[in-house]
Amino acid sequence: MTLEFRGKDSYTGSDTAAAPIIGGPFTLVNSENQIVNEQDFLGNWVLLYFGYTSSPDIGPDQVRIMAKAIDTLESKENLKVLPVFVTIDPQRDTPAQLRAYLKEFDPRIVGLGGPVSAVRQMAQEYRVYFKKVEEEGDDYLVESSHSMYLINPKMKVVRCFGVEYNAEQLSKEILKELKKHQVNA
């Protein structure tokens, strides 16, 4: 896998290595069974998380944190960030399953899924690790990285957040990024 780099070299000021480009084009299906792609999110700040509805522990915690952080930003700062959940288990997570699951956390969360190949392609674009782990019988779990991606209105990833953030910390860090990008806009 090749990483592309962009930006200015801090030592020479010339255009060379900086941050890897994360993200890219995708076409998936939302929880209303409509085809969507990255163009549908242009103009919005997006908080993106890859998970699956039958995750036993970290996944639901991360979705709760996402929902609470988004709610805090909207209620206290009057800032809208669109929460988006992409399933890494599209074989089990149908649009109806995604809709029911995400509604339990926050009805504003956009659920995305689709063919395994399309989900795998998007996960690769975002450098998301996931692997099916067989359990007893037909059951299985999915090991995965649990990062959230803050994406600007031009659909460029500006920050990645790990599981170490609680909702309050996450909302503060997102607010910092939004303010920083408003100054630079």
Image (cartoon, helix red, strand yellow):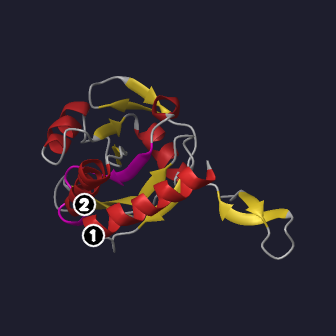
Find numbered disc 2 in the image and state the secondary structure of the residue it sits on.
Answer: helix
Task: Pick whichever, 28 or 179, lies toward us.
Answer: 179
x and y, in percent, of residue 9 in the image: 80, 69
Q: Which residue is mark 2?
A: 65
Would you say residue 56 sits in the magenta stretch?
yes
User: What kind of residue is marked 2?
Assistant: Ile
Q: Name which residue lies at 71% across and 65% down.
A: 18
Q: Check residue 166 in the rendering and tell me which mark sits there, or answer none.
A: 1
What range is drawn magenta here? 45-59
* Left or right: 161 as drawn, with respect to 4: left
Report if the CB atoms under discs 1 and 2 are less than 8 Å apart: yes
Q: Quadrant of residue 97?
A: top left
x and y, in percent, of residue 62 in the image: 27, 61
* Left or right: 30 as drawn, with respect to 54: right
x and y, in percent, of residue 24 in the image: 58, 43
Task: Pick whichever, 79 or 34, lies toward us.
Answer: 79
Q: Residues within 10 Å of mark 2 (few under 14, many from 20)?
A: many
